[in-house]
Amino acid sequence: MQFTAKEVSLLLNGTIEGNPDAIVFKLAKIEEANEGSLSFLANPKYESHLYTTQASVVIINKDLELTQPVKATVIRVNDAYSSFSVLLEKYNTLKLNKVGIEEPSFIHPDAVVGKDVFIGAFTYIGANAKVGDGAKIYPHSFLGDNVEVGASTTLFSGVKVYHDCIIGNNVIIHSNAVIGSDGFGFAPQADGSYHKISQIGNVVIEDWVEVGANTCIDRATMGSTIIRKGVKLDNLIQIAHNAEIGSNTVIASQTGVSGSTKIGENCIVGGQVGIVGHITLAKGTQIQAKSGINKSIEEENRKWGGAPATTYQNYMRSQVIIQRLPEMEKKIEDLQRMLKELQDNSINK
Amino acid sequence: MQFTAKEVSLLLNGTIEGNPDAIVFKLAKIEEANEGSLSFLANPKYESHLYTTQASVVIINKDLELTQPVKATVIRVNDAYSSFSVLLEKYNTLKLNKVGIEEPSFIHPDAVVGKDVFIGAFTYIGANAKVGDGAKIYPHSFLGDNVEVGASTTLFSGVKVYHDCIIGNNVIIHSNAVIGSDGFGFAPQADGSYHKISQIGNVVIEDWVEVGANTCIDRATMGSTIIRKGVKLDNLIQIAHNAEIGSNTVIASQTGVSGSTKIGENCIVGGQVGIVGHITLAKGTQIQAKSGINKSIEEENRKWGGAPATTYQNYMRSQVIIQRLPEMEKKIEDLQRMLKELQDNSINK
Amino acid sequence: MQFTAKEVSLLLNGTIEGNPDAIVFKLAKIEEANEGSLSFLANPKYESHLYTTQASVVIINKDLELTQPVKATVIRVNDAYSSFSVLLEKYNTLKLNKVGIEEPSFIHPDAVVGKDVFIGAFTYIGANAKVGDGAKIYPHSFLGDNVEVGASTTLFSGVKVYHDCIIGNNVIIHSNAVIGSDGFGFAPQADGSYHKISQIGNVVIEDWVEVGANTCIDRATMGSTIIRKGVKLDNLIQIAHNAEIGSNTVIASQTGVSGSTKIGENCIVGGQVGIVGHITLAKGTQIQAKSGINKSIEEENRKWGGAPATTYQNYMRSQVIIQRLPEMEKKIEDLQRMLKELQDNSINK
């Protein structure tokens, strides 16, 4: 794929300064660009790069005043950053625009596959499964019996979706994520062994969700584990059985959410956080990375940190004091000694 | 699959009140049930649901006295909860009752496959591998050369078992778990690089073990990494080379056990715990979520918490005090000031 | 594979005591060995095992003086430990010496595959992908379009490499690791939802790197996420977009490195560590397991611990004091009481 500066400018509704026929065939950071690169400059702090870049074309803000000559062709737009984002997206859409059914693949005769889909080789689509129009199912993905995958959803290579789970439209699930594995439920027996509690529920993932690589979302014991619309989950996250993650909540890598816990909408949870089971976090809650949350949070839109967690302010204060503990201990010893002297004096008097 | 109230009652050795021909075809929580649902009521606290539920049939305890009319057909049994568990299990057994060998699959001519197995499409069974009677190997599973999988064991889609590993009977391994990857062993060299130490041992998983999705169990450098009978491992757990997990021990998600550590039987380890290498935990040890265990625990049946860990009581006490640190620091400052005044007074006298 | 004591001795340039025709066909620890085992004794502390072992052949240090009769054939070498390591390596190389292309596999007509490779069944090699000479690609691996895998590199079963990623020579990647999944980047919108920022960069893994099972390395937003030569990553690690890990750095299991962070060369990072984004760690930095690193480390070759981290000495001191907090609080109360008494006395005088 290659484009002229003129074609890019038309797409972005920009104005050209320099050679409109300059050719670009890749996107690059302005400081790493070379011939054939299309770059952008949004932050005026990095203006100097504009005068030294090897990029063929650079997108800049309409109102930027140039102070030196620029070798590259320049395209002026209202907002260089968002214009470049649009290009990134178009580039990626073209790049990942696979269509067709590769062989060998396994599509059960009772499965229903929509139009314009991509089904990679070695994909397994079970009985009564449904794949929506425009979905892309990469190689080695597994859809168990009765699974539904919505329109325009992408499952990258190696995603496993157990039977009965439902995935919405415009969802992206990254490689080797597991959806619908059994919840971790066992009944202790008198002899110290455990008896497995059958997990017959499912997982429901609503529209516009993104699930990271190697993330696990367990099926409910009964009912559904639910990931609401617009949730973004990073890699290596654990979502246990019967949990519910509210709309537009974002969770960073390696965090674990225990069974039956409900996280409100628009929350932001850092990486490596642990959240116990059977609690509720109010909407807009923000959790510092590595925290441990062991009770419900009822007040909305607050920040928390620590393990066990406290308000972010308390957490930060305690952290600072922990660093001062050796000094504090020294002060106490001094106080003990001085008080002893005073007491002795007092007695001696 | 659909059943009448009468059929269910016979199975559970119960007694019917209401229409014995009421038909059910799914299991649901009493408060979420609708027509065709079979539900249960075990906890008298939720008795009110019984009078409003849309379930067609509800299982209740023999001695429950009804205080209002019930629309659903009622089946009385000795213990509603355990009767319902029996049904869940039967339901799941029927649901997952796959048998047969799907194509394409790769079964090495020197592999031995038992009777009544399910081998999903795209499964790989290496040279001299053995699959026991009634085992279910879902699509995209990999059994390396010489791997043994016992009778009635289930490997869900994408499980990878490296060469020479041994898996017992009635084991369940969830999707994308990895059994037998190399232990993390490297010899530092004079130039700062590392030389890999070959890992020629294996992993042995005994009967009735369950391994969660994306969990990793590394092979031993020599000898075996051993998961004893009845152990339950949740998702995303790391078990390092030469570790041994004792019988009926349960470990929650995202915990890591380092090399050569031995955990006793009947232990309960919370989520996101880290356990260093070359230590031993006594049987019956319980570890609080997110703890760090850096030395052996010799006393049996005790609870530990914190990082580094201390007894659970100490841990809880310290956690409370950490929250009070700002207050403690204030008290010390007050003491310093007051003592200063006393000293000044004393001198002035 | 079986060998005589004489053959082993020749290979190691050793000298034999006992039967040179003794046959061995497996390697074992001296205390677990039985007939047909080849073992070694390096640490004189365990000398007693030499007189009781059932091994057929034992490798010992040249200068070890025997104090009792030894049943096994003995091979004396300069350094028993390193000689045995050599054998482990030869054993493993023979064991894993697979060559050939198994069917069914999917190799795009525009892919280029080198000589003497192993391509397991159900492997997917995309358009314009390149596989170097002697590479071993186990079943269910996925190489997206334009991926390059260097010579003598091994990808175990289920490794997923997204399009455009570059993997060097002599690299080992364990099962179900994911290379090149999208970085976690989203632009918040006015309505509380998030807009995905397309991730068009790639991952570059240099020579002699080892990547553990289920580890995830995200592609860069633009440019490359880079794993430098000789890096060793354990299982279940998260490396976020645009991070860079310096040469010969070793990272233990379940650690997470956030976006754009650069770790210097020859660092050692423990397990379950979290490192925030956009920081730099100096070369030779060592991080205690479970630590949280939230700012750059500029001084080279130092040890750090805690969350948030401090120098290792401070960390250890604070940890000890945290255990003494209840005692400290008691002392403060005592001081308050005694001071009160003194004040009262002082006033009463």
Image: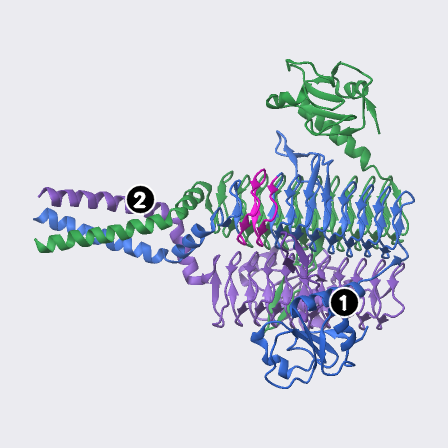
Chain colours: A green, B purple, C blue
Q: Is residue A17 above or below residue C296?
A: above
Residue C289 is a magenta residue: yes
Question: Residue under mark 1: which chain is it in?
Answer: C
For the question of whether residue A230 can be seen, the reply is yes
Q: Residue at x 70, y 61 (%)?
A: B182
C225 w.r.t. B55: above or below:
above
Q: Is residue A30 above or below residue C94?
A: above
- Quadrant where the N terminus of chain C is found in the figure: bottom right
Mark 2 crowd level (few <14, some 14–19, many ≥20, 10 Å Cα) = few
Distance from label 1 to label 2 (Cα)? 65 Å
Q: Which residue is mark 1?
A: C91
> Which span is picked out in magenta?
C261-290
Asked if residue B5 is among those painted magenta in the image, a careful observer would answer: no
Instruction: Please give the name of the residue rendered at 50% of the width and 67% of the height, measured from the top-left corner.
Output: B296
Q: Nearer the viewer, residue A2 or A220?
A: A2
The main secondary structure of the magenta stretch is loop
Residue C304 location (% of width, % of height) = 50, 49
Labels 1 and 2 within one chain? no
Q: Is residue A76 above or below residue B328?
A: above
Residue ID for mark 2: B330
Residue situated in front as seen by the camera: A248 or A5 = A5
